Image (cartoon, helix red, strand yellow):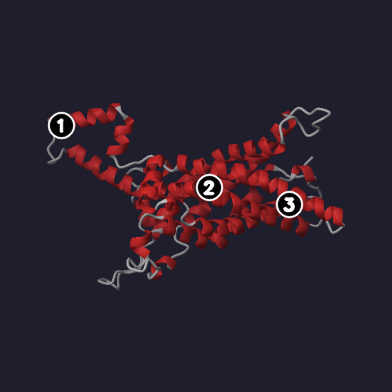
């Protein structure tokens, strides 16, 4: 049995998440800015299409606070759910003489466990992701017309847009889960297979040491390689997710303004009951929106993931869907390697402190 408690798993996951957030966050900021619809206008020269604005590299840690706060519980929830789901599925998987490890292949069990854990994690992480990506795009430098104006906190400026409509912070949940589910479903089976292969090869060559450092290094290399491949494959989904989350703040602000206008009618007039007076056409539109959520969504400026993907294809071509893919692969390789390497090492270390061990099969 594993020597790890739920507290060990939560603590190891939190330490791993905090480490990654601090080290690779700048690369994530650059990736967000490159994938944004305003990238060409804000950061490049229109004639040469080359980067000519230092703002691209300014404020690379904007929004990191919200991510750190949300990543700690979300990562703990992910690993706790993943470990328990994987253990449950493994125990329920019937074995036969020809399939001693079970009828269902282990990669499928790992994919199901990681996908289940991702759904739980995304519910906690979505608001922070929306705040983070919008904060990453905020220009906090003083304007040329008012150079003495103090810098604006990017996170607070972003939060102000959701003050009247906080539920809009969860609009990116489907997009985040839509990206993370295929990502983890691809990464974790590859990660498990790579790790087992590297360990088996070292054991055959007699170079295995069984130390904490070796376990952490093998985990980091396997997770980094698997994460890089999964990141490249899922880049188009990530591009769409970035645009949906960047639009969330604008939509929340526009809906707030629309709500204010609606309360007072188009000219600010109200009836005897204090409600806004609308024209017949406006009343008909409101009724149509109430009956048709698709119309309501379109009227309010929200677009489906499919429509956003088509817009990217129309504007930028196929290359537009893969924008930021190389940068995402690099930071995912570093992030996944550090994340899972620190997590596994932390689990072994915390169990060892109590004089207990972690069995090989209880690790990833």
Q: Horizontal and vertical percent for residue 233? A: 55, 48
Q: Residues within 10 Å of mark 3 (few under 14, many from 20)?
A: many
Q: Position of residue 342 (x, y in %)?
A: 67, 56
Q: Where is 93 relative to 265, above or below?
A: above
Q: Which residue is mark 1?
A: 281
Q: Nearer the viewer, residue 186 or 169?
A: 186
Q: Nearer the viewer, mark 3 or mark 1?
A: 1
Q: Nearer the viewer, residue 290 or 183?
A: 183
Answer yes or no: do the residues labelled 1 and 2 have beta carbons within 8 Å?
A: no
Q: Residues within 10 Å of mark 1 (few under 14, many from 20)?
A: few
Q: Are marks 2 and 3 in contact (CB under 8 Å)?
A: no
Residue 40 locus on image (x, y percent)? 36, 61
Residue 138 appears in view: no
- The numbered disc on residue 350 is 3
Visible residue check, residue 249:
yes
Quarter of image, res 58: bottom left
Q: Which residue is mark 2?
A: 234
- In the picture as drawn, the residue positioned furthest to the front comes out as 317
Is the residue marked by circle 2 packed among few (<14), some (14-19), or many (20+) residues within 10 Å?
many
Q: Is residue 80 left or right of residue 232?
A: right
């Amino acid at each position: 049995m594993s020597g790890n408690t739920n507290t060990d798993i939560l603590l190891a996951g939190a330490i791993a998440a905090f480490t990654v957030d601090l080290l690779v966050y700048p690369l994530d900021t650059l990736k967000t800015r490159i994938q944004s619809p305003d990238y060409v206008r804000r950061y490049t020269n229109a004639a040469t299409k080359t980067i000519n604005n230092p703002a691209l590299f300014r404020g690379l840690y904007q929004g990191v606070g919200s991510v750190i706060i949300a990543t700690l519980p979300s990562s703990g929830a992910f690993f706790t759910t993943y470990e328990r789901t994987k253990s449950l599925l493994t125990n329920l998987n019937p074995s036969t003489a020809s399939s001693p490890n079970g009828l269902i292949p282990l990669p499928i069990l790992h994919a199901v466990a990681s996908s289940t854990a991702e759904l739980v994690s995304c519910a906690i992480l979505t608001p922070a992701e929306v705040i983070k990506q919008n904060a990453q795009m905020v220009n906090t430098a003083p304007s040329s017309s008012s150079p003495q104006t103090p810098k604006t906190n990017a996170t607070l400026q972003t939060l102000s847009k959701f003050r009247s409509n906080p539920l809009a912070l969860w609009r990116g949940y489907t997009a985040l889960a839509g990206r993370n589910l295929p990502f983890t479903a691809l990464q974790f089976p590859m990660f498990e297979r790579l790790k087992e292969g590297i360990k088996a090869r070292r054991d055959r060559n007699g170079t295995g040491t069984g130390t904490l450092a070796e376990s952490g290094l093998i985990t980091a290399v396997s997770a980094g390689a698997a994460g890089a491949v999964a990141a490249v494959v899922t880049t188009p989904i990530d591009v769409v997710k970035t645009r949906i989350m960047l639009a969330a703040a604008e939509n929340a602000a526009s809906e707030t303004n629309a709500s204010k206008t609606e309360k007072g009618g188009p000219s600010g007039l109200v009836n005897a009951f204090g409600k806004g007076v609308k024209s017949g056409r406006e009343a008909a539109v409101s009724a149509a929106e109430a009956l048709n959520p698709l119309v309501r969504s379109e009227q309010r400026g929200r677009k489906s993931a499919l429509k956003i993907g088509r817009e990217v294809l129309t504007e930028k071509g196929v290359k537009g869907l893969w924008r930021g893919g190389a940068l995402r692969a690099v930071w995912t390789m570093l992030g996944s390697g550090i994340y899972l390497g620190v997590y596994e090492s932390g689990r072994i270390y915390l169990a060892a402190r109590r004089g207990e061990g972690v069995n090989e099969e209880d690790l990833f």
